[in-house]
Amino acid sequence: MLMFVLKRAGAAVLLAIGTIIIAFLLTSILPGDPTTAMLSERAAGDPAIVAALREKLGLDQPLYVQFFIYLGNLITGDLGTSTQTSRPVLTDLSQFAPASAELALFAAIIAIVLGVGLGVVAALRANGVIDNVLRVVSLGGVSVPVFWLGLIVAALFSTQLRLFPSSGRLDAGQTPPPAITGLFTVDSLLAGDPGLFFQAVSHLVLPAFVLSAPMVGLMLRFSRASVLEVLGNDYVRAATAKGLPAWTVVRRHVLRGALVPVITVLGTAFASLLAGTVLVEQIFAWPGIGSYAYRSASNLDLPSIIGVTLFIALVYVVVNFVTDLLYGIIDPRIRTA
Amino acid sequence: MSLLTIDDLHVTLPGRPALVDGVSLTVDAGQLVGIAGESGSGKTVSALATLGFLPDGASTTGSVVFDGRDVLRMNRKQLQEMRGNDVAMVFQDPMTSLHPMLSIETQLTEHFRVHRAATKKQARARAIELLELVRIPNPAAALEAYPHRFSGGMRQRIAIASALACEPRLLIADEVTTALDVTVQAGILHLLHDLREQTDMAMLFITHDLSVMNVTTDYLYVMHSGKVVEHGPTRDVLAEPAHAYTRSLIEALPGAREVLAAPSTAAEGDRA
Amino acid sequence: MTLTDIDPKLDADGIPSRHNRWVKRLRLPAAWRRPLGIAGLVIIAFWVLVIIFAPLIAPFDPLAQDSARYLPPSGDHLFGTDGVGRDIFSRVIYGAQISIPIALLLVALSVLVGSTIGAIAGYFGGVVDTVLMRIVDLFFAFPAIILAMAVAAALGPSLVNAVLAIVVVFWPTYARVTRSLVLGLRDSNYIAASRLLGVSSFRALIREVLPNIVGPVLVLATLELGNAILLLSGLSYLGLGAVPPTPEWGAMVSDGARAFYNYWVALFPGIAIFSVVIAFNFLGDVLRDALDPRTAKSVAVVDR
């Protein structure tokens, strides 16, 4: 077991280093000279000053030395400075990350409840009308451009029907709960303020549903396939032959096997949702790293873009590592592979 | 009155030749009946019909009367009551018919608790009783274990134990030795033979392997292409087959004459 | 999937007629599956016609800012006009000329790059394989939109750079699939036979391996076309792809986001994107089921 954990951890570390290398490569293919952005026009015209700045930034060094400078900066938490906010990127990230984490979490819950629930139904009614309708639903989910869906949903449910708010995490002017996790829903419950909790949830509804749409489609398809595979197993028929009620067979014999693969997909689902925030948050004025990335992209704020990229990629690596471990715990055969 | 009477059963899937084409057979209480035939002969479909399992989308005519009631006309509740309780089945492959993630105890007791409204304790006691019946060593420890810890032969014994839990009047054994080694097969057959002595359970024994038929069954039906081509007391059928197909099955056996001449005792070797 | 000879042992299942719930094997009556594939083909055919006949169908020049701004849909302007007075109907039509061919190009490039690398990795094995696959794993560590966004931003906003960025994101999928297909074939008998006959490694690769890879890769490509369009329009939405005034659908949705109350500006381009993507997904779904299950497994598209 220890060997397994070590091997996986080693792979994760290698992967992390790899993502850092790629992030570094991206910074170093920036077109143009970064010094021109940093100097006033007159200073930029003076080759001596430019040369001095380049030397200071280490830009005159060979690439691999620059990489180590970059790595060194990373370790101290220096991801560069955002050209929009003029603050260290890391500060920006830590400010915005909790909001996105909360959104991704809710979207994940929706994706699981709806996606897996419907997938199980589709499998149990395989090839019937419901199944085929759900097939179209799942294909629709993965086909819809989320940024457009966000606009439509916001326009329809918020502006037209006035059912849910479509801006921000809380009502305008509302003080957030004392920050413990950074997730307003959790924090408001911890602070014993149910009213605030429901307000936070109502703001989450629309963006979380929009963000979850492709994931619902995927989960639906995935869990349907998983349940169908289990249904085809002899032990399901053997269980029915014992005279067990259908519901018991599904609950005890079918779902147990079918949901294991689903659980192991959860981690990557969360990370994918985190990535999806880039396209969704801005529409709902959600102050997370998604909006941050969106603004950075529009403004070509490269340090921020690369900072966000690196952050999400590293989250991905960690999540995959944990998922691998989970799978090894659940299925003993994997450990010896 | 017979325990089980299948009368002119036809099972057809649209657009293809009938799976079961007018099959009639009878099993009396306590009787050991064999169905022999190769893959595709319809023997399994017929046997499964006894439990009310029919292929998806099949059209069925005829009747399958168990204990006075037609299985084909039963509703879901009646089927549930019958299955595992009055009629039980052991499937071919013990690797796949036991659930890999449920403990032996769960798999032996769940239907017992449903059919007998037993408590956990009562069910557990019954489970240990059953494991002893099928000669699994150290039953208490076996209850906690999971199927993958047991060999094929032991798994099949556990499957048989599970089938016996509610003292069914009819046990359907579908190719129960086919997936096992020859040496292990003998042990299972021996076990079934002993069970027959101890209970008055009837058995429907399905196989393509005629060599086990003389050893286990009283009465034999030979099936081919969905029809019964020959039937009679096992000894007689094997000794003087009337139908060409039966003859070809017998001749296909290695050492056919020796098998037929052997006295009907269970083979030795209880190493399963 | 056709119904093969039924082994009664395997096929008996369920409960008589009206109680039937379980199916033992995944049997897909062809009649149910085809409507989706046909729908997909029809939609794609429709858009191909739009692409070809754009100049004839579009009532206005997509770049002409002649009309009044933010006109709602009407007889003159079926989809209304945008913020600088351009006819949206015409822009949506011309947008097809951008999104669809570029997506095809993009997938073709990814297939080329990815399959080559994957085939090499699979065929030669050993160190080459390990190194290449580690690199592939590395790319898989980035969610698609994030990596595409970063590369496109680093290169600078333009359609060409967006294409490059998405190729960077897509090639690993094809590398993996091709590699596993090649691995499956490499040790097969007819490769050994052709080797014995003295055919060089490279020749063997082209002659024997290639034809067997084409099918599954094509299916995967069809499935990925939808994703390509989504990524392309996504990048444009972020401002990293098509530059104004190019009538690219994603950029148009972005314009619409800014003019939120003039719903038509974002609505129609988005419907266009959705229709094309879902058409390719319908098609790809049906194609995937036509594959035999073994190769279908290696073609399973993992969400990034």
Image (cartoon, coloured by chain):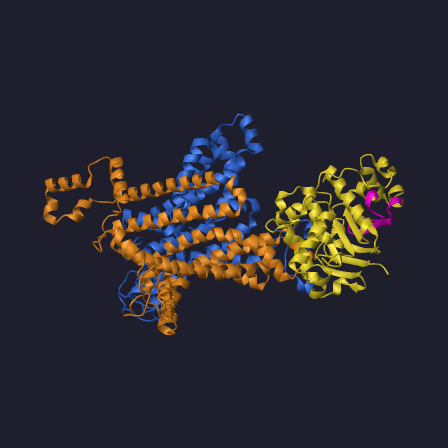
| Residue C6 in view in this figure | no
| Residue A307 in view in this figure | yes
User: Which residue range is magenta in the image?
Assistant: B214-235
Image quadrant where one finds the N terminus of chain B: bottom right
Q: Give the blue chain's letter.
A: C
Q: Is residue B231 magenta?
A: yes
Left or right? Give the position of C47 relative to B125. left
Q: Residue at x 73, y 55 (%)?
A: B88
Image quadrant where one finds the C terminus of chain B: top right
The hue used for chain A is orange
Left or right? Give the position of B214 relative to C2. right
Q: Where does residue B210 sit, x and y in percent of width and height?
A: 80, 42
Q: Where does residue A82 sit, x and y in percent of width and height?
A: 23, 52
Q: How many numbered marks appear?
A: 0
Q: Residue at x 55, y 26 (%)?
A: C196
Is C184 or A331 nearer to us in this picture? A331
Q: Is residue B162 magenta?
A: no
With respect to residue C274, does A315 lie above or below? above
The hue used for chain B is yellow
Q: Residue at x 58, y 64 (%)?
A: A129
Q: Where does residue C260 sit, x and y in percent of width and height?
A: 31, 67
Is C144 or B30 nearer to us in this picture? B30
Q: Residue at x 46, y 59 (%)?
A: A111
Is B270 or B79 nearer to us in this picture? B270
Q: Where does residue A93 sit, x and y in percent of width and height?
A: 29, 54
Left or right? Give the position of A317 relative to B21. left
Left or right? Give the position of A242 relative to C260. right
Is A174 or A220 nearer to us in this picture? A174
Residue C50's image quarter?
bottom left
Q: Residue furthest bottom?
A: A161
